[in-house]
Amino acid sequence: MDPPPDEFRNCLALPRDVTASILMRLEAFEILTSAQMVCSPWHNLCKDPSMWRAVHMRNTVAPYWEFPYDLEKMCRHAVDRSCGQLVDINVENFGTDELLRHIADSSSRLKRLRLVKCYGISDKGLSGVAAKLPLLEELDISYSLLSKEALEAVGRCCPLLKSLKFNKRGQKYHGACDEEALAIAENLPELRRLQLFGNKLSNDGLQAILHGCPHLESLDLRQCFNVTLAENLGRRCAEQIKDLRRPHDSTDDYEFDASYELFDEDEDYDYYGYNDYEIFEAYDDPDY
């Protein structure tokens, strides 16, 4: 039997800090489109800058240009509500250089930046704002068009960076390339945690990272199929790295699709399931 109505606890009677803790578990999109409209106390609370120290905004609709809301505008609004207190932001499946510039201009305290499938953010865009993020400690760039240029700029401008994720989609039988590995080795000596899922680095690139990042404790090399951890290199990794994920280790706990492609030299595919033509054709679309 259901309890009588007077035994239901009124959510409006909860202490302000408890209500704030509950609302902070929501994503920014949910707060802006629904939670703040529940009642006046919630609306006022949702305008408090302390509610926006962490902003998590994801587009769960693909393709992202069909999303029914202007996520760029909403994200800028969320950043503005922080009044400079933003320390953690997660942007997934949308985002442009202009949005990144607004985040950097408004958030000098930013410590954590996560960009997932943000194909509208370029090397030039991230390089141009890196100097405005001097307190950055964690950077997650997963499935993007960014390359060594962005990594070099971050290394020059973000001396406190301790954690880097630079993830791509694994491809077997693709030629090795150590440009990104060398950019990390030469510019990010204070790294403690590094995830390079699906990267094309070779043993030479890995050697450079081990030498250039002496404080490295965690290294994820899953689906880095050009790396062979045998003999001296394997021993060095085992001795230097406390938490090591090898190229063929299980991907069961990886948060994205861990399937990989068998590279076909006749196709110009990138790492994410689209070819370059399809990606840039989308940006040329006037309805985008």
Image (cartoon, grey):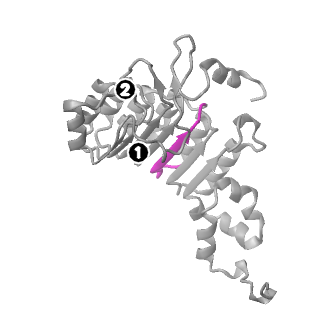
Q: Position of residue 188 (x, y in %)?
A: 32, 37
Query: Which quadrant holds the N terminus?
Result: bottom right
Q: Horizontal placement of 86 versus 33: left or right?
A: left
Q: Which of label 2 and label 1 is nearer to you?
A: 2
Residue at image position (71%, 78%) is 11
Q: Horizontal placement of 115 versus 13: left or right?
A: left
Separation of marks 2 and 1 at Cα, in angstroms: 28 Å
Q: Alpha-carbon neighbours of circle 1 within 10 Å: few (<14), some, or many (≥20)?
A: some
Q: Nearer the viewer, residue 36 or 22?
A: 22
Disc assigned to residue 134: 1
Q: Which residues are magenta?
A: 107-119
State which tag comes first along the sequence, 2 or 1: 1
Count the numbered circles shown.
2
> Residue flagged by tag 1: what amino acid is it?
Pro
Is disc 2 placed on a helix, strand or loop? Answer: loop
Q: Are marks 2 and 1 in contact (CB under 8 Å)?
A: no
Q: Position of residue 144 (x, y in %)?
A: 54, 32
Is disc 1 placed on a helix, strand or loop? Answer: loop
> Residue flagged by tag 2: what amino acid is it?
Leu
Disc assigned to residue 201: 2
Residue 113 painted magenta: yes
Residue at image position (59%, 35%) is 118
Q: Position of residue 106 (x, y in %)?
A: 55, 48
Query: Which quadrant holds the C terminus?
Result: top right
Residue 17 painted magenta: no
